[in-house]
Amino acid sequence: MQALQVIERIVPDRLRQGARELADAVFVRRPPGRDVGRTPQPLNQDYETGRWDYLSNLEEMARYAVIDGYCRHNGSISSVLDLGCGSGILRQWLNSHEIIDYVGVDLSDYAIGIARRKWADPHTRFVAMDVASYTPDRKFDMIVFNEVLYYFPYPEDILMRFAAFLEKDGFFIISLWDSSDSRRAWQTARSNVDVIDSVQMRHRSGVSWNVRKCRPVGDTK
Ligand SMILES: C[S@@+](CC[C@H](N)C(=O)[O-])C[C@H]1O[C@@H](n2cnc3c(N)ncnc32)[C@H](O)[C@@H]1O
């Protein structure tokens, strides 16, 4: 564990950061990169033991709502690729849009199993696969990285790869909670995207997020 992460663990300010901190304290935390060569088992275990249960809590609501808002404001989102979709919480938020094709991808087949049980409609597909090796079969209006980019040792490579699967005028949504892992991910990823808009939010528990609407740098589609 890096010194910065140790300091972040012990300073009292961090203790205010609600359920996320609690989850990290109770369950073993995997730094990004450790899952390289990634197998679903550790992530499945996270879901089975309830580590990710807090994702459905009220304090997480704001970032899903902002992503839904970007979708709504755009007016014409009909296809969404949700990378690291977990158990499909965002799919629920997007339910009021006329989405013709939603594809959620997650390495945890356990999470995908939950998502599939919730969503069995012809417009929704869930794929249990590593995002790093997943190749879409179409282009999308919106590609979402909702609290997943910090899992990748080279997030910039992931963004570059998926840039090819954006429709004309399509965009990325990148949500990152405020943590050292997220700052590292954004530091390397930011040179690959132009930020069109961003929202910073802070829950009363102390957890904060940046949700950014971006386009790949130099995208002239
Ligand atoms: C913090 S959770 C966020 C889940 C979901 N995006 C949400 O906000 O409700 C991170 C998710 O990323 C998934 N994940 C981590 N590494 C992944 C990878 N290499 N490929 C696909 N999914 C991955 C985990 O299984 C987990 O579901």
Image: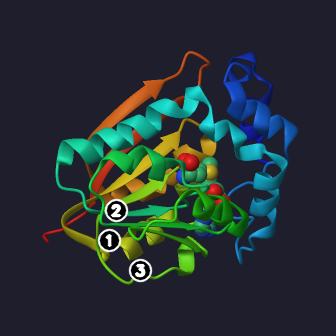
Residue in the image at 61% along x and 76% along y: 129
Q: CA distance from mark 2 to mark 1?
A: 10 Å
Q: Secondary structure at mark 2?
A: helix
Q: Quadrant of residue 150?
A: bottom right
Camera-near label (3 vs 2) is 3
Residue 136: image tag: 3
Specify whether residue 188 is in view: yes
Q: Residues within 10 Å of mark 1 (few under 14, many from 20)?
A: many
Up-down relation of residue 101 to residue 2 (above or below): below
| Labels 1 and 3: the sequence-earlier one | 3
Q: Nearer the viewer, residue 88 or 12?
A: 88
- Tell me, yes or no, whether the two marked residues, 2 and 1, touch with CB atoms within 8 Å: yes
Pointer 2 residue: 192
- Give amino acid for label 2: Asn
Q: Secondary structure at mark 3?
A: loop
Q: Residues within 10 Å of mark 3 (few under 14, many from 20)?
A: some
Tag 1 secondary structure: helix
In-front residue for pair 100/190: 100
Ligand 1's image quarter is: bottom right
Precedes in sequence: disc 3 or disc 2: 3
> Where is residue 161 shown, x and y percent of the image?
40, 76
Circle nearer the viewer, 2 or 1? 1
Measured Cα–Cα span from mark 1 to mark 3: 11 Å
Tell me what residue is drawn at x 75 percent, y 64 percent. Answer: 34
Around disc 2, counting alpha carbons within 10 Å, would you say few (fewer than 14), some (14 to 19), or many (20 or more)? Answer: some
Q: Residue at x 73, y 54 (%)?
A: 31
